[in-house]
Image (cartoon, helix red, strand yellow):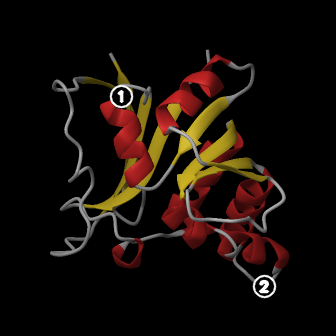
Amino acid sequence: MRMLIFAINTTLDGCVDHTKQFVDEETLEYFTHLTREVDLQVFGRKTYQLMVPYWPEVAKNPSETKAEHEFARAFDSTNKLVFSRSLDSVEDRNTRIVRGDPGDEIRKLKQEQGKNILVGGVDIPSQLMQLGLVDEYRFVVGPIVAGEGRRLLEAVSLPERLQLKFVESKFFKSGCVALHYSKQ
């Protein structure tokens, strides 16, 4: 069975607003490696529209840093699924729109053959956490206290407390820490 992995950047105070994040070469390398280990990325409309067309354009631009270019190529080559009721179409050739229930779709996808599935953003992962469908959590915590902005999991209401198992951590020169947990 495929695992569903939730990965996100956050500040020390839990802010997940992309404009308040610290992203350096090591962070991009970490997410590039993670992206290459999956064959499907899942997003809601808002996160998808932040990522596309931005990263596909970076992939075409050789003047970007090596880390940016490598992440962009990994992102661009991976199949994507976007949950949206309002998008009419997508410009990315590897993307499919799903208008139905995220839980039903993810349950089906987890049963299919293939590599693991990576979910990003806030709204869709929150829904999938509430349904108990997230198997692994990957948080990259940056050395920033934002003091404002959208918080990680602020709208999540779990049916019961979720006790996670620590898998590993990785420290970056910048002060970022990548934390990896799995569901027990």
**Marks 2/1: CA–CA distance:** 42 Å
Q: What residue sits right under mark 1 in the picture?
A: 131
Q: Is residue 110 toward the left or the right of residue 102 in the image?
A: right
Q: Residue at x 84, y 76 (%)?
A: 60
Amino acid type shown at disc 1? Leu
Residue lying at 70% horizontally and 74% vertically, measured from the top left: 53
Q: Is residue 2 among what the camera can see?
A: no
Residue 148, position as x, y percentages in the image: 18, 75
Q: Quadrant of the N terminus?
A: top right
Element under label 2?
loop
Numbered disc 1: secondary structure: loop
Numbered circle sitting on residue 91:
none
Compare marks 2 and 1 and give the one earlier in the sequence: 2
**What residue is disc 2 on?**
63
Residue, x 19% and y 71% (percent of image)? 145
**What residue lies at 78% left-to-right and 61% top-to-bottom?**
73
Q: Please tell me how many numbered marks the rendered image carries.
A: 2
Q: Is residue 183 left or right of residue 45?
A: left
Between 65 and 87, the residue placed more toward the observer is: 87
Q: Mark 2 vs mark 1: give the one in front.
A: 1
Q: Is residue 95 at all visible to an observer of this figure?
A: yes
Q: Residues within 10 Å of mark 1 (few under 14, many from 20)?
A: few
| Residue 90 at x, y percent in the picture | 74, 65
Q: Single out the residue that lies furthest toward the bottom.
A: 63
Quadrant of the drawing holding the C terminus:
top left
Looking at the picture, which amino acid does disc 2 mark? Ser
